[in-house]
Image: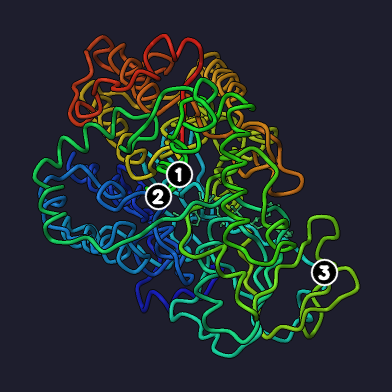
Amino acid sequence: MNVDCTATRGERSAEMGTVLDAVVVGAGFAGMYMLHRLRGLGLSARVFEAGSGVGGTWYWNRYPGARCDIESLQYSFSFSEELDQEWIWSEKYSSQPEILDYANHVADRFDLRRHIVFDTRVTAATFDEQEKRWRIETDCGDKVTAKFCIMAVGCLSAPNRPAFEGMGDFRGPIYHTGEWPRDGVDFTDLRVGVIGTGSSAIQSIPIIAKQVSALAVFQRTATYSVPAWNEKLSPEYLKAAKADYPALRAKARGRPTGFYFPFNAKPALEASAEDREKQYEEAWQRGGLPFLGAYGDLLFEKAANDTIAEFARRKIRSIVRDPATAELLCPDNVFGCKRLCVDTGYFETYNLPHVKLVDVSKTPIERFTTDGIAVNDTTYELDAIVCATGFAAMTGSFDKIRITGRNGRTLSKKWQAGPRAYLGIASEGFPNLFMITGPGSPSVLASMIQAIEQHVDWLADCIGHMRDIGATTIEPLLEDEDAWVDHVNDVSTVSLRSTCSSWYVGANIPGRPRVFMPYIGGFPVYVQKCNEVMSNGFNGFVLEGARSKNAAPRVRFTERWRVPIDIDVISPAAVAAKRVPVV
Ligand code: N01
């Protein structure tokens, strides 16, 4: 046993030799829904979760101001009409505590907790080629085996902690937004430094600024952000929205993003400057991620993108009173290239006299000192530091587990030059190892919960089919996996998104291979591909040990993902031209 688990797990002793149908790693939204489906199939399953509760991202990211940036009515499970009807979201974009309450409600409502072992991190998963089973080990000494090992580890779960020189010297506390203390932090009257200006920083800075006596924000890259215009949801609004909830859910599934919002497919470059201004202003007033849906060509044509980027810069200049600070806050990269941020009062915060923006783009943070942070011969004196420095995206959580497949090959070795997975679901050489929203699937480019549900439903049908036909293992064929990885790369090049140093390409962390990791071809296009693979008897996969190889897969759960693709811009012609917009 590597860690003292008695403090958190009480007297419960490590599980030795338990034989399960499936082990799921992680009890976030993906792990919970997977567990629900596995139990529904009558399979034995165990979830191991490093945290003390369910919720994953929403368990760990408790920083002030954390909330979703997709409307809660859509950023929620859609598999149960009863759940949709009974749960009441209080705000358009719900806060982290409310989303965590929802996760806990789901765990209780579907009786999931008794199959979840908390405070326990999976450290190794090894495929036993003789037994055709996975041997799973945890940091609490558990050793269990399972036919299926399902990684529900999240895309943004492994915090990126840059190793700043002198970190150990700093006298005060250092926090990371992605691992925020459970009991919160009181910054009242303290001098605080925030490193980073991504989504986590942009949400937390306005709230932290209200508590502190001085705030220094260390900015390496300026960020575009659109106002959320968050609001309370009235009972009348909820009633009207829920009157036809299934229709809203179905419309969302037909969208490239997996969530529904007004979208204008027309090209920006065909509009007059006056019309564009009007369109951008209206979209700005609606706010949030749908701002990028103002025109259809914004992520494909640099000249079109320049028009929205300039509009956003003008907004910053109109909000921030000090011209020098405003200029520093104006990004010069492609609009929406990095994940677009959605804020409440972010730029306005820089009008407060005790808030200072420190440019670390040309002269990086030199070191932490006992008293603060040194940049370019100046020490900013601080009582606490917040690292809003993001995550080792998409693959970081896989790196933390020693995953060994056939012939002793590890996943980290196979993924050395970038992740390789067929449909972002499974990787050749690792039979019966599945990943939910893995690299090569729409994942972070779609509404995460819809992306999760689609994967889980597909996996549940796959596992159910394997049981129906008596198959022992399923594994992608190398040539199909290679072709998919090539396709993912190929499609990414048509989007301006592939052009900047974002976490989408692993560029936020020095030394990581530069590969565009999520699938940018659009959620429904991807779903169609997954459905075809299933209908064709799991095309591109090899199934071993089956009694009845030709039996058609029984569709239990995936049916609801067969929806018409509903907007012009992702018509087959648009797909062929690779013009598939994704927010
Ligand atoms: O992380 P980020 P995040 N010195 O990687 C900077 C989702 N999310 O946690 O851009 C100085 O975006 C780094 O600078 P640069 C969402 O998908 C959603 O904010 O690399 N600075 C950047 O400014 C999001 O995209 C919500 O030059 C350093 C920042 O740290 C994703 O999670 C809320 C540095 C990191 O930004 C990640 O967001 C929060 C260094 N050495 C998160 N290293 C919602 O609204 C890094 N930085 C739902």
Residue appearing at x 50%, y 11% in the figure:
577
In the foreground, 127 or 395: 395
Residue appearing at x 46%, y 55% in the figure:
227
Residue appearing at x 78%, y 85% in the figure:
371
Amino acid type at circle 1 is Glu
Q: Which of marks 2 and 3 is in front?
A: 2
Mark 2 vs mark 3, CA separation in Å: 43 Å
Q: Dot 1 corresponds to which residue?
A: 281
First in residue order: circle 1 vs circle 3: 3
Amino acid type at circle 3 is Glu
Tell me the element at label 2. Answer: helix
**Residue 46 x %, y %:** 32, 53
Mark 3 surroundings within 10 Å by alpha-carbon count, few (fewer than 14), some (14 through 19), many (20 or more) = few
In the displayed image of the protein, which residue is found farthest to the bottom? 189
Circle 2/circle 3 CB separation < 8 Å: no
**Residue 528 x %, y %:** 33, 19
In the foreground, 149 or 298: 298
Mark 1 vs mark 3, CA separation in Å: 44 Å
Q: In which quarter of the image is residue 86?
A: bottom left
Tell me the element at label 3. Answer: loop
Mark 2 surroundings within 10 Å by alpha-carbon count, few (fewer than 14), some (14 through 19), many (20 or more) = some
Circle 1/circle 2 CB separation < 8 Å: yes
In the foreground, 571 or 6: 571
Q: In which quarter of the image is residue 573?
A: top left
Label of residue 285 in the image: 2
First in residue order: circle 2 vs circle 3: 3
Mark 1 surroundings within 10 Å by alpha-carbon count, few (fewer than 14), some (14 through 19), many (20 or more) = some
In the foreground, 231 or 201: 231
Q: In this view, does 351 lie above or below 275?
A: below
